[in-house]
Image: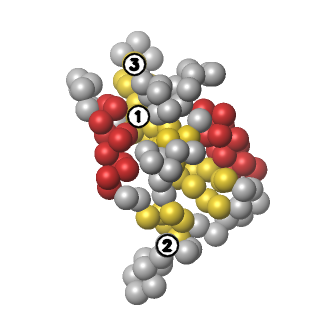
Amino acid sequence: MSSEDKKISLSDAITWTTDWRSAPSTAARAFLIPIEDLQGVLDEISGQSGTPKARAYLAMDGTEEKLIFVGTQYNDKTGVYEDLLPAAGEDYQTATNSIYDFTEPCPSACDPNSPLN
């Protein structure tokens, strides 16, 4: 993962989301999301017409829960918002489309005074 822009490779994203689905249980109750990092996803989809949307996936990096984000684009033919991903084998640091991991799971990035915690 790039510590500067929080991008991850397609390979890591596939591994992490697969690991989440096979995890027996997780401890995450919420995720802390820096707005400046979320802006990267918004920038990728901002030029789209219609109603641009992003998608979040639940993932695991080892034992740490993750929430990874991708931009999407609406496909008029299928009626589906399709993920905008880097191509397989494409350098994720220079790809047009990116997968972002910039969340901190709660616990430990929790608000101890929140009634939602």
Question: Tag 2: residue type?
Answer: Ala
How would you rate the neighbour count of disc 3 (Cα within 10 Å): few for under 14, some for 14-19, many for 20 or more?
A: few
Mark 2 or 3, nearer chain start: 3
Question: Is 99 in front, or is 67?
Answer: 99
Q: Which residue is mark 2?
A: 109
Question: Is 64 in front, or is 50?
Answer: 64
Q: Percent x, y for residue 55?
A: 44, 40
Which disc number belongs to residue 75?
3
Q: Nearer the viewer, mark 1 or mark 2?
A: 2
Q: Percent x, y for residue 8?
A: 56, 40
Q: Percent x, y for residue 101?
A: 51, 49
> Could you tell me how far apart the alpha carbons at marks 3 and 1 are, in whole angstroms?
13 Å
Q: Which residue is mark 1?
A: 71
How would you rate the neighbour count of disc 2 (Cα within 10 Å): few for under 14, some for 14-19, many for 20 or more?
A: few
**In which quadrant of the rendered view does residue 32 lie?**
bottom left
Say which residue appears at 52% left-offset and 25% top-offset: 86
Instruction: State yes or no: discs 3 and 1 in contact (Cβ < 8 Å).
Output: no
Say which residue appears at 53% left-offset and 71% top-offset: 106
> Could you tell me how far apart the alpha carbons at marks 1 and 2 are, in whole angstroms?
25 Å
How would you rate the neighbour count of disc 1 (Cα within 10 Å): few for under 14, some for 14-19, many for 20 or more?
A: many
Disc 2, SS? loop
Q: Nearer the viewer, mark 3 or mark 1?
A: 1
Q: Nearer the viewer, mark 2 or mark 3?
A: 2
In the drawing, does residue 55 fall left or right of residue 53?
Answer: right
Question: Tag 1: residue type?
Answer: Gly
